Amino acid sequence: MRPTVRRSSPALPCISTARERRGRGARWGTSTVSRHGAERVYSGLRLAVRAVIVEAGRLLLVNAYPGAQSDLWCAPGGGVEPHASLPENLAREVYEETGLAVRIGAPLAVSEFHDPGRDFHQVELFFAARITEGAPSATWADTEGVVNRFRWAAKADMAALRFKPDILPELAFGTPAHALYDPLEPIVP
């Protein structure tokens, strides 16, 4: 079953929201969205979910910066909407960003970052996930324009990439004995 797809795109790195973009404000914070979506001001605490998808020893990464603004990669996912479980939110976000249907597994980690200049703080919950329908395609286009490209990265590739959070390789390729916590860090453009 394919999740419900949202409309619009984010302004912050590796951040996709539906609730904020529709102008209703974040559940744990607030946002302002101009009529044409050009101005976005996020504040408060935002909850997000991310999928750690590993196939054939490679991790699926996405880039949500417009054009080639940044080389920062992250796991697919995005903002949590109320009245849906964390796994439901994550399945929806992964489908919107990649066109892939996924089965959400166990929680793996909690990560957080902030932008003190904007009074913005995001807490991300990472879950194991596996593809159940579809295959990543170079021709896939995120209809909302959130994700502009994706790539697969082997463990050896990670050393040459910029990604967040720092614990992502351990989540994908390690075997943590317990859920991991990546402490608060500022947003790095």
Image (tube, grey):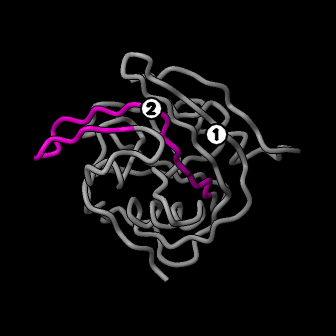
Most prominent secondary structure in the magenta stretch?
A: strand
Q: Is residue 156 above or below residue 16?
A: above
Q: Is residue 178 magenta?
A: no
SS under mark 1: helix
Q: Is residue 45 magenta?
A: yes
Alpha-carbon span between mark 2 and mark 1: 25 Å
Residue 77 x, y percent position in the rendering: 49, 53
Which span of residues is magenta-colored?
30-53
Residue 65 x, y percent position in the rendering: 32, 38
| Residue 176 found in image quarter | top right
Residue closer to the observer: 82 or 151:
82
| Residue 71 found in image quarter | top left
Q: Residue furthest bottom?
A: 1
Question: Going 74% across and 60% down the picture, which residue do you hit?
Answer: 106
- Residue 40 seen by the camera: yes
Q: Is residue 129 above or below residue 179?
A: below
Give the amino acid type for the residue marked by disc 2 in the picture. Answer: Gly
Side of 171 relative to 142 (left or right): right
Side of 175 relative to 135 (left or right): right
Residue 123 x, y percent position in the rendering: 57, 38
Residue 78 x, y percent position in the rendering: 46, 51
N-term-proximal mark, 2 vs 1 = 2
Q: Which residue is mark 1?
A: 168
Residue closer to the observer: 172 or 102:
102
Side of 18 relative to 45 (left or right): left
Q: Which residue is mark 2?
A: 44
Q: Image quadrant for the C terminus?
A: top left
Q: Residue furthest left?
A: 36
